[in-house]
Image (spheres, rainbow, N blue to C red):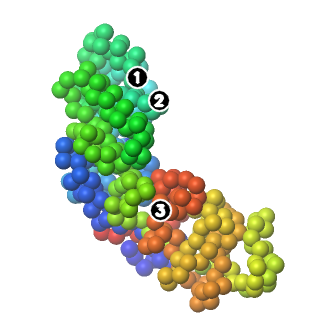
């Protein structure tokens, strides 16, 4: 936002206007109940503070994080909003929840037992197929047989999480929908929370009293294989430190994995895997300069990445190369790196100058 940040070697731009537009878009697609903002992992790497503040200003009043510490970091930014901790209350942390008005997501009989009698509303996480967290069928039978177990817990929502929501025709989706409907029958009158980003696009059968999108807020495509309905939120560019001419036959980078087939110009840029720029992009990725593609050559190293700029002699030390942005969607970069957009965004490290566009 200030001129100073542009002196850095790599700049991450977060378009908060696009983020808010994405939240409103998702909320409009989920008329059955409010739409939360999932801001775990530092707002998917983009900065939980600015992200939560922008969503709150837009009217979002339900937030999810993964850890207690993540909740405490934004508690004051979202006053009065529900702020829920997905990973659940690790034993001993209960007083922190009470003191700061946080909502625990209870995912086991043990969580329930430790939470009974505390006058704080909780979310009950029911497992319908993920087998990570959440009470399972046997636990539910136990709860049904002994209603006193849940007697002291005030339930705000019953929630479950989809296994394959981004694969629209995966039979797991309908199976989980049926399982969740059956579970909710055990908790009459308790509000439900179901869909993540992709779940919102599965249609009204996946609607609930509270949607929990994360990825789509940040511009990740919730409908892979179809055009991305979301606005791009993230831009990343890096500065060229040096440009050198090398002869045909010379190699570039660790282990000489790339060798020039012709006399070449190599630009060395100020970004590496320590910045979350994936090493898996070695000899695979590319950047864009002035609308032209420049291939990433050689290994991505810790702090540096090299590009073949032979076709772009106007690139000089100090030039900026775009790595995420128009023509370089996060999902494509993830595809080249054999991962998903979530991992790309959450890997973006703390080294960048960060610019938040209003
Ligand atoms: C991360 C998470 C979400 C958000 O999922 P997206 O796919 O990013 O929309 C929702 N619910 C739970 C339980 C999660 O862990």
Q: Nearer the viewer, residue 352 or 24?
A: 24
Between the C-alphas of marks 1 and 3, the distance is: 35 Å
Q: Is residue 9 visible?
A: no
Q: Quadrant of residue 107?
A: top left
Q: Secondary structure at mark 3?
A: helix
- Residue position for label 3: 330
**Which numbered disc covers residue 252?**
none
- Residue 136's label in the rendered image is 1
Image-based side of 118 in relation to 349, left or right:
left
Q: 229 above or below 204?
A: below
- Residue 238, quarter of the rendered image: bottom right
Q: Give the mark, 2 or 1, whose residue is nearer the N terminus.
A: 2
Q: Nearer the viewer, residue 182 or 157?
A: 182
The residue under the point 47% across, 29% down is 131
Give the x, y percent position of residue 153.
Answer: 27, 22
Residue drawn at (82%, 78%), measured in percent from left and top?
249
Q: Which residue is mark 2?
A: 131
Q: CA distance from mark 2 to mark 1?
A: 8 Å
323 and 228: which is toward the camera = 228
- Give the class, few, some or many, for how many residues have Cα within 10 Å of label 1's Cα (few <14, many ≥20): some
Residue 253 left/right relative to 141: right
Q: Residue furthest bottom?
A: 314
Quadrant holding the C terminus: bottom left
């Amino acid at each position: 936002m200030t001129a100073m940040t542009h002196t850095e070697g790599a700049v991450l731009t977060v378009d908060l206007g696009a983020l808010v537009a994405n939240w409103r878009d998702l909320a409009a697609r989920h008329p059955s109940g409010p739409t939360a903002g999932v801001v775990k992992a530092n707002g998917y790497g983009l900065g939980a503070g600015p992200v939560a503040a922008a969503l709150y200003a837009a009217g979002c009043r339900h937030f999810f994080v993964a850890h207690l510490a993540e909740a405490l970091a934004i508690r004051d930014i979202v006053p009065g909003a529900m702020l829920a901790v997905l990973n659940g209350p690790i034993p001993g942390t209960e007083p922190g929840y009470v003191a700061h008005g946080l909502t625990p997501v209870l995912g086991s009989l043990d969580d329930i037992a430790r939470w009974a009698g505390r006058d704080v509303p909780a979310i009950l996480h029911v497992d319908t197929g993920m087998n990570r967290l959440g009470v399972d069928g046997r636990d539910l039978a136990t709860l049904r047989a002994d209603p006193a177990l849940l007697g002291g817990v005030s339930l705000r929502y019953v929630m479950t999480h989809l296994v394959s929501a981004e694969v629209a025709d995966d039979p797991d989706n309908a199976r989980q929908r049926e399982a969740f409907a059956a579970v909710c029958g055990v908790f009459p009158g308790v509000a439900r929370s179901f869909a993540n980003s992709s779940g919102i696009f599965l249609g009204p059968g996946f609607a609930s009293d509270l949607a929990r999108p994360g990825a789509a807020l940040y511009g990740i495509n919730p409908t892979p294989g179809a055009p991305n309905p979301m606005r791009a939120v993230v831009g990343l560019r890096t500065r060229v430190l040096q440009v050198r001419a090398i002869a045909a036959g010379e190699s570039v980078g660790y282990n000489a994995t790339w060798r020039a087939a012709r006399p070449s110009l190599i630009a060395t840029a100020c970004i590496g895997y320590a910045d979350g720029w994936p090493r898996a992009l070695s000899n695979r990725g590319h950047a864009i300069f002035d609308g032209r593609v420049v291939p990433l050559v050689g290994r991505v190293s810790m702090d540096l990445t090299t590009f073949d700029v032979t076709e772009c002699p106007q690139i000089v030390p100090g030039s900026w190369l775009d790595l995420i942005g128009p023509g370089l969607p996060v999902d494509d970069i993830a595809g080249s790196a054999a991962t998903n957009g979530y991992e790309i965004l959450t890997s973006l490290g703390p080294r960048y100058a960060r610019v938040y566009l209003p």
